Amino acid sequence: MTSVRAPAEFWIEAPEAEALLDTWLVSEGDTVEAGQVLAHVVVVKTTFDLVAPSAGMVIEITVPQGATFGRDGELATIDDA
């Protein structure tokens, strides 16, 4: 299992900010490739592409579209087995 989290570079300009999970581009049960864009995340008016850290199946989305999350928040889980 691989935990999907926003990478550190998303937080460089605002280390204490919360981020908005703007749009999911995948759903639970989808198969993804490493590096595939999974979602769009907004941190202090800047939109970032959240990419898959590994290939596999998205088994859980833990932060729904439109919700906010903190720096260490788990956004989804990929079964890379």
Image (tube, rainbow, N blue to C red):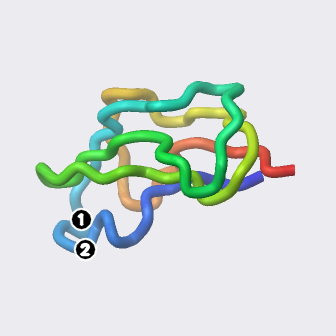
Q: How many marks?
A: 2
With respect to residue 37, does 10 lie above or below? below
- Judge whether 28 appears above or below 8 on screen: above
Q: Residue at x 28, y 41 (%)?
A: 20
Where residue 12 is drawn, which disc sits there? 2
Image check: 45 left or right of 33?
left
Which x, y percent locates residue 22? 30, 34
For label 2, the SS is: loop
User: In the picture, residue 67 is in which quadrant?
Assistant: top left
Which residue is found at the position 24% from the left and 46% from the top?
Answer: 42
Which mark lies nearer to you, 1 or 2?
2
Residue 29 numbered tag: none
Q: Residues within 10 Å of mark 2 (few under 14, many from 20)?
A: few
Q: Secondary structure at mark 1?
A: loop
Q: Which amino acid type corresponds to the residue marked 1 in the rendered image?
A: Glu
Q: Which residue sits at x=38%, y=60%?
A: 71
Q: Residue at x 63, y 55 (%)?
A: 34
Q: Residue furthest right?
A: 81
Q: How many angstroms separate mark 1 from mark 2 (CA)?
A: 10 Å
- Seen in the picture, residue 9 relative to 23 is either above or below; the reply is below
Q: Are marks 1 and 2 in contact (CB under 8 Å)?
A: no
| 60 sits to left or right of 49 | right
Q: Position of residue 21 (x, y in %)?
A: 35, 38
Q: Within 10 Å of the Cα at label 1, are there few (<14), some (14-19), or many (20+) other Cα atoms?
A: few
Q: Which residue is mark 1?
A: 16
Q: Position of residue 11 (x, y in %)?
A: 28, 67
Residue 65 image offset from top left, x and y in percent: 38, 28
Residue 73 position (above or below residue 24): below
Relative to 20, 58 lies left or right: right
Q: Amino acid at mark 2?
A: Ile
